[in-house]
Image (spheres, coloured by chain):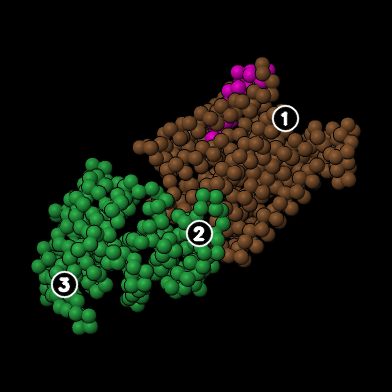
């Protein structure tokens, strides 16, 4: 990378940050009560006891923070997995993590856990389901001490199928109330009442970003293949394990807090590869920023379209992301 | 004779329980170009990959300047040995990004960006291999010959003292073959680089090597090791390749050249 490259990186990071801030500000302003930017700053920095402040601090800000954390986490996880598996079609949910999480939540709802434990039952059950799948895929993919990428991918896809079939089965035999709970959770929503969980997801998301950046050079080398990376001094087996676990935990955390939010982890890394190039140093940072901004934006849409009712944000990310992506691909002359 | 630069002693290699190479012993002096030749499937690439430990040796050892390569720390090994692979997958990465990856072994612990030295080295070796005009092109959009040149530039940027090359001239036309091999020779003369490579083309091997290692598929070991004129002769070629050839010397260099004998 030369001086020209450094300038380009700064430009990319700068504009994505501005975009993210604009989305976040919009998300704070829009809603059943429209607020001006001045009112927001007033509430945030001076008058923390007003009604405006309680709307901002109690409802909108946590939601924006969760959108940033989950959007960033899913995009970084997608970038890591696409790099690790050297396959642009891999996304966080390909490995069956979302399937495991939804199965966990489904079973928790049917066993009546939310009634016993309150709303924390959802993320706990989701994370337990995700965790079991991570251990399964990791354990089965680990042969002779090395992770076998293709084996893991196939196992993940199979676990996805099995768990989505089981979810269907459970849905078929469940009561009307339980059913709508399950459906709503599966489709993804950023309406998370627990401030502890939001902080946890944000901390996890940023930790994941730092770990990913720390291994970005190794990931660049691993794109060339294991032999080439090993010759460049990379401990490929170790790096692959660390990055796989990081991506899995990022996904598990996101799914347990926000349900299944489709396409963010697939589309954002792709977009960023077109914009920022394939160097993982810039790709990981820009994916985090773009994913955070994209999900914040989609959540505004999800809240506004049929206000005061809310659409599942996972549906919006799927529609907006998918349509825009197809349009961009069809405009692009060169193959990816 | 001084201590050899690279010493391969009773090396056995293979994949799992399948032995491909038995009891390989030879040594390489500093600044020599050694070419491994032999019929298809005799284990040339396996041998080349076993040297730096990409394939773990089943027995025996490889020492470079007295140090056992299997116990050499990973970063140090990457700073001293570079390898040009036979095929480079067409990946979505520009030539310059790819060449700069060769600087990774020299990054300090907390280094995140390339420094001035890294960029200058990449620049000079891209110029040296005549690919500097392609720096912004993705690897997937350049020819296989240019990709091979990029692979060589990346290996040189690593500033190795031992360069391993797996068929660096496969799929290349005669001008690119000569260009690459001349460059290898220049590197050796200019930087005292030691080169071990695998080559299918016996004439190129004969023309550019100081020593030639002929592997035999039947016995899975070294058939003959020495200067081109002691290894490349009719009897050795017939014994290993089971093909009758005519050997004559190149009128320009005096080195042995191979001509195929037709049955007509």
Q: Position of residue B119 (x, y in %)?
A: 53, 65
Residue B44 visible here: no
Residue A155 as seen in the image, left or right of residue A128:
left
Chain of the residue that carries numbered disc 2 in the rendered image: B
Secondary structure, mark 1, is helix
For label 2, count other residues whose C-alpha is less than 10 Å away and answer few (under 14), some (14-19) or many (20+).
Answer: some
Distance in Å between CA atoms under marks 1 and 3: 79 Å
Which one is in front, B228 or B9? B9
Q: Which residue is mark 2?
A: B92
Quadrant housing residue A202: top right
Q: Which residue is mark 1?
A: A195
Residues rendered magenta in the picture: A97-115
Residue A57 as seen in the image, left or right of residue B159:
right
For label 1, count other residues whose C-alpha is less than 10 Å away and answer few (under 14), some (14-19) or many (20+).
Answer: few
Q: Residue at x 88, y 31 (%)?
A: A49
Q: Nearer the viewer, mark 2 or mark 3?
A: 3
Distance in Å between CA atoms under marks 2 and 3: 44 Å
Residue A130 as seen in the image, left or right of residue B38:
right
Q: Position of residue A119 (x, y in %)?
A: 69, 24
Q: Is residue A152 above or below residue B72?
A: above
In the rendering, what colour is chain A? brown
In the rendering, what colour is chain B? green
**Hey, which residue is sitting farthest bottom in the picture?**
B251
Which one is in front, A93 or B78? B78
């Amino acid at each position: 990378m030369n001086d020209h490259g450094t300038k380009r990186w700064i430009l990319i990071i700068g504009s994505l940050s501005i975009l993210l801030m604009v989305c976040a500000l919009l998300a704070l302003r829009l809603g059943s009560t429209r607020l001006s930017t001045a009112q927001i700053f007033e509430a945030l920095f001076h008058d923390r006891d007003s009604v405006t402040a309680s709307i901002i601090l109690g409802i909108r800000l946590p939601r924006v923070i969760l959108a940033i954390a989950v959007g960033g986490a899913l995009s970084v996880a997608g970038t890591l997995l696409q790099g690790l598996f050297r396959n642009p079609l891999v996304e966080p949910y390909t490995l069956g993590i979302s399937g495991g999480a939804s199965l966990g939540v489904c079973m928790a709802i049917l066993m009546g856990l939310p009634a016993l434990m309150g709303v924390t039952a959802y993320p706990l059950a989701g994370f337990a389901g995700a965790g079991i799948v991570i251990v399964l895929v990791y354990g089965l993919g680990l042969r002779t001490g090395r992770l076998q990428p293709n084996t893991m991918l196939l196992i993940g896809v199979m676990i996805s199928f099995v768990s989505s079939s089981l979810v269907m089965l459970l849905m078929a035999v469940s009561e009307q109330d339980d059913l709508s709970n399950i459906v709503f959770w599966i489709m993804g929503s950023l309406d998370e009442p627990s401030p502890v969980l939001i902080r946890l997801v944000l901390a996890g998301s940023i930790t994941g970003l730092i770990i990913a950046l720390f291994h970005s050079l190794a990931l660049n080398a691993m794109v060339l293949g294991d032999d080439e990376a090993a010759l460049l001094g990379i401990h490929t087996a170790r790096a692959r394990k660390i990055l796989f676990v990081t991506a899995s935990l990022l996904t598990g955390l996101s799914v347990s807090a926000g349900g299944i939010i489709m396409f963010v982890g697939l589309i954002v890394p792709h977009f960023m590869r077109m914009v920022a190039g394939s160097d993982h140093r810039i790709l990981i940072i820009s994916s985090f920023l773009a994913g955070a901004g994209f999900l914040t934006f989609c959540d505004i849409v999800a809240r506004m379209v049929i206000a005061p009712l809310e659409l599942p944000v996972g549906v919006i990310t799927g529609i907006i992301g998918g349509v825009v992506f197809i349009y961009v691909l069809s405009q692009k002359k060169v193959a990816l | 004779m001084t201590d050899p630069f690279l010493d391969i002693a009773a090396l056995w290699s293979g994949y799992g329980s399948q032995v491909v190479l038995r009891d390989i012993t030879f040594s390489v002096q500093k600044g020599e170009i050694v070419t491994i030749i032999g019929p298809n499937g005799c284990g040339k690439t396996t041998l080349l990959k076993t040297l730096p430990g990409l394939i773990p040796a089943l027995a025996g050892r490889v020492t470079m300047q007295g140090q056992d390569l299997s116990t050499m720390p990973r970063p140090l090994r990457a700073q001293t040995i570079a390898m040009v692979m036979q095929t480079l997958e067409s990946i979505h990465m520009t030539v310059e990004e790819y060449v700069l990856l060769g600087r990774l072994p020299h990054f300090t612990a907390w280094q995140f960006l390339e420094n001035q030295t890294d960029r200058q080295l990449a620049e000079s070796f891209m110029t040296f291999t005549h690919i500097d005009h392609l720096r912004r092109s993705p690897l997937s959009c350049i020819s296989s010959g240019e990709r091979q040149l990029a692979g060589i530039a990346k290996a040189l940027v690593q500033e190795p003292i031992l360069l391993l090359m797996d068929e660096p001239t496969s799929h290349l036309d005669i001008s690119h073959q000569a260009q690459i091999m001349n460059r290898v020779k220049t590197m050796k003369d200019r930087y005292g680089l030691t080169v071990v490579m695998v080559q299918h083309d016996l004439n190129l091997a004969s023309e550019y090597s100081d020593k030639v290692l002929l592997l035999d598929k039947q016995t899975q070991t070294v058939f003959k090791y020495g200067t081109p004129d002691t290894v490349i002769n009719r009897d050795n070629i017939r014994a290993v390749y089971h093909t009758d050839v005519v050997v004559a010397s190149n009128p320009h260099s005096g080195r042995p050249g191979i001509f195929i004998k037709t049955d007509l």
